[in-house]
Amino acid sequence: MVEAAGSVVGAGHPWFGTPRLTPAAPVELIRALLRHELRDTGWPYQRILPATPMTIPRASYAEVFRVSAALLDLLRRTALETAPSTAGRLAAYRMPASENQLFVRDPFVEERYADCVVRPDLVIGPDGPRFLEFNVSGALGGVLETHSRLAVWRRLHADEVGRLPFSSPDPFAVRAQLFRSLCAELAVAPRVAIVGSARVEGVTRRYFEIETDFHNSHGLTTRFFEPEELADAWDCAPHLRYPVGLRNFTIPDWHDAGLDTTPVQCALDNGCLLVGTQTATFLHSKLTLGLLSAGRPWMTSAERALVDRYVPWTRVLTDGRTDRAGRTVELVPFVVAHRDLLVLKAGLGESGKQVVIGREVDQATWVAAVDAALADGTSVVQDLVVPRTCRVALIADGADRAHEVDVAPVLGPLLFGGRPAGLFCRFYGDGSAGIVSVRAGSSSSDNVVVAV
């Protein structure tokens, strides 16, 4: 999902704090509950599981969401000002033809609701949080997983009157708030369509229906729709329509699964607003982070300082000059000569694909990757961040007790409609770093981070 510094990690960091929770039940029970909550969803089997929620101080927790919201606002403005229209942005970003679809008819509505569902990815570097990328899409990973992990930790750590030694919002509850607010703003009935498909690799129907069941049990009428069922959301009596919904899929995933997006376009054309809208793709592109890191003419000095503090040096890979540590450099020669310092990323790469970590390849491979990316014109280079570690308790397969290890987590704060919605994290249980994906190795795992 996101890269840090290969197998290299730094020592711990005070940002993580020192208070930690101890396992609140026998490991057999913890293991069983964690597996039960994510059963039959397509989530991969994990050999190493967390024994407790990961904890950080309240000030660190607040910082993550405060900065996420501020950077998202700047990212949104950066993406929209690249061109005054959707057609202009498609050209400016050199978007593949497959992304020129699923826009709503009203451009203002299309732009307004692009950033409803967001998950940045960050690591804790030597100087604190560093935001490596922003995932802006209704199909974010980590939402169901955070809800499920949190349900286990709340059950195990609550005292006899239900008090908890930590705090965290539930992502499903916050997403329900988002839809209630959206329906109120649009003056439509609170009826929500969750659009996705169990035919996409790695998910099942239950993956979507857990959230629909949660919403329905909390008084928000919600239904899951496969694409061929979606006409039922709008081609019916007015009181039965679903005027808003979650676009819980990506165009590439549906393309790979052989699924037709035409029913989605029909629903959009007939008044069903699915968030985040297709304009989210421009915010999601790493090119936008590169533009923001380089600085925009409209930024205040405070905004410039915020980006410099929290975003690693990132540039769109093009011929020309740029600033680097207070001096001007020719970008391409600098990139070629300093592969040990840099990561090369495709603008729309997913799950660690189309990522080259300079120090993990030889010079010839690096130069070839840079040349190819330069010719394509849709990649960025970014400073390599060596992540700091925190100590956690883990449960290995077959173990009868938890063990402790230092891990380098990738943190994923969830923001729905700008509201904090939980803090997802992924890590390698063997203490290594690198391209962290829960589907990428026998020691990969995930957890929820809570405030104490």
Image: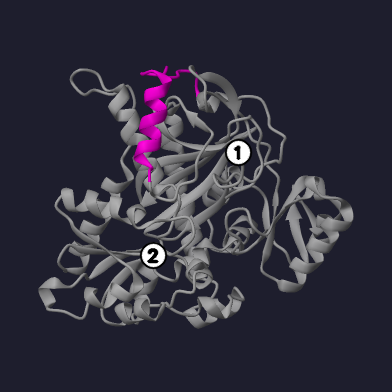
Say how many tags the image has. Answer: 2
Determine the residue positioned at 34% across, 42% down. 147
**Residue 452's x, y, as percent?**
38, 24
Label 2: element kind: loop
For the record, the magenta segment spans 17-39
Q: Which residue is mark 1?
A: 442
* Three-letter code for the amino acid on which mark 1 is drawn: Ser
In the depicted view, which residue is nearer to us: 131 or 207? 207
In the depicted view, which residue is nearer to us: 156 or 86? 156
Q: Is residue 60 left or right of residue 154?
A: right
Label 1: element kind: loop
Residue 37 visible in the snapshot: yes
**Residue 214's x, y, as percent?**
23, 48
Relative to residue 266, is residue 81 depicted above or below?
above
* Three-letter code for the amino acid on which mark 2 is drawn: Ser
**Residue 277's x, y, as percent?**
39, 69
Q: Which residue is mark 2?
A: 197
Determine the residue positioned at 50% across, 80% down. 100
Density class for disc 2 (Cα within 10 Å; few <14, some 14-19, many ≥20) is many
* Mark 1 to mark 2 CA distance (whole Å): 27 Å
Q: Is residue 341 left or right of residue 66?
A: right
